[in-house]
């Protein structure tokens, strides 16, 4: 499955579970990677999901919680074992 298809399947399933989207799936510029943001119905839990792939493997990285920017800084320090599996944050 390609990242675009995978994030759409995730989005469809999250909508069925009652999540509200604050950002519909969008492609990250110049990458085969996508991002979306959603929250629970009561807006207590905020989440941002990233899906990327390199043609062989997919990754789904989801940040959950109120401190999204802090979590994103941690993600920027990680290095995937395969090129293209993580989006460029």
Image (cartoon, helix red, strand yellow):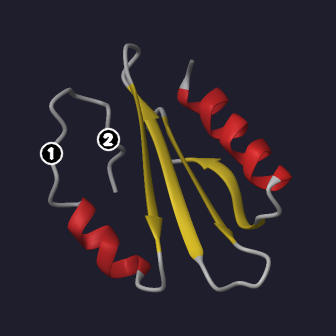
Residue at image point 36% right, 22% down: 54
Compared with 56, 78 (above or below) is: below
Task: Tell me the residue that label 1 is attached to.
Answer: 79
In the visual, does 7 lie left or right of 72?
Answer: right
For label 1, the crowd category at 10 Å Cα-Cα, with few meaning under 14, some 14 to 19 and many 20 or more, is: few
Task: Tell me the residue that label 2 is attached to.
Answer: 86
Q: Which of 12 and 34 is in front in this view?
A: 12
Element at badge 2?
A: loop
Image coords of residue 70 (percent x, y): 30, 80
The image quadrant of residue 72 is bottom left
Q: Nearer the viewer, residue 28 or 39?
A: 39
Q: Residue 33 carries which label?
A: none
For label 2, the crowd category at 10 Å Cα-Cα, with few meaning under 14, some 14 to 19 and many 20 or more, is: many
Image quadrant holding the N terminus, namely top right
Residue at image point 32% right, 41% down: 86
Element at badge 1?
A: loop
Q: Can residue 29 be seen in this view?
A: no
Residue at image point 48% right, 50% down: 50
In the visual, does 47 lie left or right of 58?
Answer: right
Compared with 30, 41 (above or below) is: below
Q: Nearer the viewer, residue 86 or 65?
A: 65
Image coords of residue 28 (percent x, y): 50, 48
Sequence-first tag of 2 and 1: 1
Residue at image point 22% right, 60% down: 76
The image quadrant of residue 60 is top left
The answer to whether the residue labelled 2 contacts the one labelled 1, judged by CB atoms less than 8 Å apart, is yes
Looking at the image, which residue sits at the far front? 17
Image coords of residue 58 (percent x, y): 42, 28
Mark 2–mark 1 distance (CA, rounded to whole Å): 8 Å
Q: Is residue 79 visible?
A: yes
């Amino acid at each position: 499955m390609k990242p675009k298809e995978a994030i759409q399947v995730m989005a469809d399933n999250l909508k069925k579970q009652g999540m509200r989207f604050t950002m519909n799936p969008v492609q990250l510029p110049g990458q085969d990677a996508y991002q979306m943001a959603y929250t629970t119905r009561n807006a207590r839990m905020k989440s941002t999901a990233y899906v990327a792939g390199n043609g062989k493997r997919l990754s789904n990285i989801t940040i959950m919680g109120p401190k999204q920017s802090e979590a994103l800084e941690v993600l920027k320090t990680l290095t995937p074992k395969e090129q293209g599996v993580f989006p460029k944050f």
